[in-house]
Image (cartoon, rainbow, N blue to C red):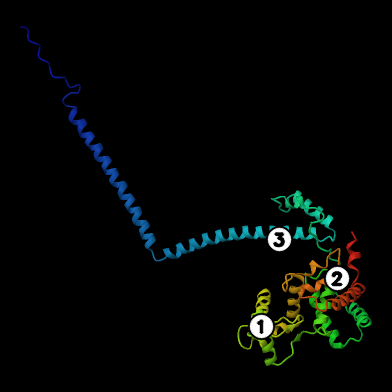
Amino acid sequence: MVKAAAKKPASNPLSPGLQPAIDDRLKEADLGLKSADIKLKEAELIEKRAWYRFLSAPLTPVLITAIAGFVVTQVTNSMQASANLALEREKSKGSLILKAWETGDPAVSLRNLQFLAKIQLIDDPTGVIGKLTSEDAPFLPRPGGPVVPVSASDMKVFFERYKQAFGTITQRTVDNLTQLFQDISKDVSAQDIRQVAYVLATIRFETANSFSTVTEMGTDASLEGKYGPDSPFGSALGNTSPGDGARYRGRGYLQITGRNNCQFMGSALNIDLVDHPELAVDPQIAYRITSLAMFDGRFTGKKLADYITADKADYYNARHVVGGLGHASDIADAAVKLEAILRETVGDQSAQASQP
């Protein structure tokens, strides 16, 4: 039986003297790595401590607040600049649209609007402007100068013609009309001589030909019986407290009456007419109320433009702007006369509107 030869142990390729030296170097390298890691962590800890000391410093909140304020200011300024730019663009568009309308001719206004939309100076995302026809295109009468006399010479002519048409005119009426002309001349809604003639005719009737603001006459007791909370008129006018009937009696050119009307018009004009209804007799405030009622339709929902347009002057039915048709014929007749006087005094707008 043959025995297998005994295996010799594997020989070490390194000499016995080199192996310890290598092991020592590996241990040194490992210690170096650990030392470097410790130093890195120490550096991180130092950095964190430094940042903590910075945050804990007494002046730091001030600095942070200042930095935050600077950032907020810059962002706010940027947003404000963008908002201002957008606002100016919208103003520019609005101005262009207004100029396009101010022609007195629907066909010309339509061409103007469609041209502005075509070259994208105004927006028409839904294509509404492109679909308009001359029948439904918006337009405004072309401004043709003043609609009431302003100069002393024009007013002299007006009062001479007024006396011829309506009879004797007192100095008080002259003074009241002079004030009224000043208010109308500043009213951007007063652009059509015929509409202005109707406003003057209405004020003339409502003030018994004096053109003076009025306060409804009557004792407190009689007015309370007429407009008080327990009366049919008082309930409709929003008078809810005892004394409201006398407190909210008719005042001004159109004699605004009742708590509700004072609240409504006061809000529109940013004036406290509820606590101070007597302010309605101030000529300028009285005219502003009249303008809102007649040009904007704030009384009945009907406005003068519903009856007096480029194609017609329905002075009779224009009475609906203030209320019912009571005395509609008298006011219409006065409006015809006042229109003629105004045209002779300040010029014929229809002739001016035909000028290129």
Q: Quadrant of residue 48?
A: bottom left
Q: Tell me whether circle 2 and circle 1 mark residues in contact (CB < 8 Å).
A: no
Of pointers 2 and 3, the one earlier in the residue sequence? 3
Element type at marker 3?
helix
| Secondary structure found at label 1 | helix
Task: Looking at the image, tell me whether mark 2 or mark 1 is earlier in sequence order.
Answer: 2
What amino acid is found at the position of numbered circle 2 in the picture? Arg
Q: Position of residue 59 (x, y in %)?
A: 42, 65
Q: Position of residue 237 (x, y in %)?
A: 67, 80
> Marks 2 and 1, Cα distance to the nearest angstrom?
35 Å
Between tags 2 and 3, which lies in front?
Answer: 2
The location of residue 328, given as percent across then percent down, is: 83, 76
Which of the 4 quarters of the picture holds residue 88?
bottom right
Q: Earlier in the sequence, mark 3 or mark 1?
A: 3
Quadrant where the image shows the N terminus: top left
Q: Quick check: can you spot residue 37? A: yes
Q: Nearer the viewer, residue 29 or 311?
A: 311
Per the image, the residue denoted by label 1 is 234
> Which kind of residue does numbered mark 3 sit on?
Lys
Observer-nearest of 356 and 201: 201
User: Which amino acid, mark 1?
Assistant: Gly
Name the residue carrying label 2.
194
Mark-to-mark CA distance, 2 and 3: 30 Å
- Disc number at residue 91? 3
260 vs 349, nearest the viewer: 260
Q: Residue at 84% across / 60% down in the picture?
A: 103
Q: Nearer the viewer, mark 2 or mark 1?
A: 1
